Image (cartoon, helix red, strand yellow):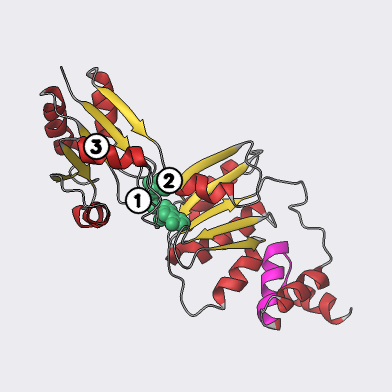
C-alpha cells in the first residue's frame, strides 16, 4: 500500500503557531520534503524533531517529485512543508500534489497558518468575497494591466508583495484603482507586526518617510465603493497629504498625478483657498 503525502502548514513567523497535529505528523512521517533545509531545521530543532529532510524547491520540483512519488509508492509517508505558511500557496508543491492525485496516492492537508487569511482576518476589510492573486507582476506595465483587469471585481483583493516593490505597487494602485482603502499587513505574527491603513497615496507618503522598507508584506485592497473618482476638493486632498507628513511640493505633485491635472492647476486651486 502506498504511503500518504501530508501537506503541512508551518508558522509564518512566530514558531508557536503550529498545531499539535502538524507536530505529531512531522514526528511520525518517514521523511520531510522542504524548500530550504536550514529554515525547516530551525522549526524542527525548536520542537526537538529529528527527521530526514529532502529539499524540494522551484528549481528541482520536477525531478524531485518523481523521487518522492517513488518513496510514496513504496509505502513511505512524506510531509511536505514550505519555508513559511501553507505549501502550494505562492510556494512549491503543486506538481507533486497533482501527480500524487493522478497516481491515486492519498494526499492529506494539515491546515494552519497562511499570510492571506491572517492578514485578511485582522484587516477590517470585507471578507465575504475576496480574490488572492499571488505576487503582482514586477514591471509597471504588466502590474497596471492586472490591476485594470481587477477594477470591476466586487470584493477584497489580496496580494503578496516584496518590500522593494511596495512603493511602485501603491503608485500603480492609485493610478488604476484610485483612492480605495488599502491595508498593508507587515511582519505578521512577528515582533514588529503592524497594520497600515489608508489610501494608496497616503500609505506611499507614510512609507516614503521611513529610512528603509523591510519585512514581509501582504497587501490588501478594499472593494470599490463607487467614489474612486475621489470627489474631495483638490485643496482638501493636498492639505490631507501635508498633514500626513508630505512636503507641499510632494503633495501638489501627487494630487496632480492622481487627478490627471497639471501641477499649475493644483497649485492655483490650493493657493486660492
Ligand atoms: N505559503 C506562504 C503562506 O501560506 O502564507 C506564502 C509564501 S510566499 C513565497 C511569501 C510571501 O507571503 C511574502 O513575500 C509576503 O508577501 C507573504 N508573507 C509571508 N509571511 C508573512 C508575514 N509574516 N507577514 C506578512 N506577509 C507575509
**Discs 3, 2 touching: Cβ within 8 Å:** no
Q: Residue at x 35, y 51 (%)?
A: 84
Query: Can you tell me whether the CB of the residue at mark 2 lies under 8 Å from the nearest atom of ligand 1?
Result: yes
> What segment carries the magenta color?
249-262
Q: In the rendered image, which residue does mark 3 sit on?
A: 79
Residue 268: in sight, yes or no?
A: yes
- Report the Cα–Cα distance between label 3 and label 2: 16 Å
Per the picture, the main secondary structure of the magenta-coloured stretch is helix
How far across and down, in percent of the image, does residue 237 sit?
Answer: 77, 69
Which comes before the other along the chain, label 3 or label 2?
3
Residue 113: give its label: 2
- Report the Cα–Cα distance between label 2 and label 1: 8 Å
Name the foreground residue: 25 vs 249.
Answer: 25
Q: Secondary structure at mark 2?
A: loop
Left or right of residue 73, residue 141 in this image: right
Q: Residue at x 51, y 48 (%)?
A: 118
How far across and down, in percent of the image, does residue 167 sit?
Answer: 52, 66
Q: Residue at x 60, y 57 (%)?
A: 183
Crowd band around label 2 with a 10 angstrom C-alpha radius: few (<14), some (14–19), many (20+): some
Amino acid at each position: 500500500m502506498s504511503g500518504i503525502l501530508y501537506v503541512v502548514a508551518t508558522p509564518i513567523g512566530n514558531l508557536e503557531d503550529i498545531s499539535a497535529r502538524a507536530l505529531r505528523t512531522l514526528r511520525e512521517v518517514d521523511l520531510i520534503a522542504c524548500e530550504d533545509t536550514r529554515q525547516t531545521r530551525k522549526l524542527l530543532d525548536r520542537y526537538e524533531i529529528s527527521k530526514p529532510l529532502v529539499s524540494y524547491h522551484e528549481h528541482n520540483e520536477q525531478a524531485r517529485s518523481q523521487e518522492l512519488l517513488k518513496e510514496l509508492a513504496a509505502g513511505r509517508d512524506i510531509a511536505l512543508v514550505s519555508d513559511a505558511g501553507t505549501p502550494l500557496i505562492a510556494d512549491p508543491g503543486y506538481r507533486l500534489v497533482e501527480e500524487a492525485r493522478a497516481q491515486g496516492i492519498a494526499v492529506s492537508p494539515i491546515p494552519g497558518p497562511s499570510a492571506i487569511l491572517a492578514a485578511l482576518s485582522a484587516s477590517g476589510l470585507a471578507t465575504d468575497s475576496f480574490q488572492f492573486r499571488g505576487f503582482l507582476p514586477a514591471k509597471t506595465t504588466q502590474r497596471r494591466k492586472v490591476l485594470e483587469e481587477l477594477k470591476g471585481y466586487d470584493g477584497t483583493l489580496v496580494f503578496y508583495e516584496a518590500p522593494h516593490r511596495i512603493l511602485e505597487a501603491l503608485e500603480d494602485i492609485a493610478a488604476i484603482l484610485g483612492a480605495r482603502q488599502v491595508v498593508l499587513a507587515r511582519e505578521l505574527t512577528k515582533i514588529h507586526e503592524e497594520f497600515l491603513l489608508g489610501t494608496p497615496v497616503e500609505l506611499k507618503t507614510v512609507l516614503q518617510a521611513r529610512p528603509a522598507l523591510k519585512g514581509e508584506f501582504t497587501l490588501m485592497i478594499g472593494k470599490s465603493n463607487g467614489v474612486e473618482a475621489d470627489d474631495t476638493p483638490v485643496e482638501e486632498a493636498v492639505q490631507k497629504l501635508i498633514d500626513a507628513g508630505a512636503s507641499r511640493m510632494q503633495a501638489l505633485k501627487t494630487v496632480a498625478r492622481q487627478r490627471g491635472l497639471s501641477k499649475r492647476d493644483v497649485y492655483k486651486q490650493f493657493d486660492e483657498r
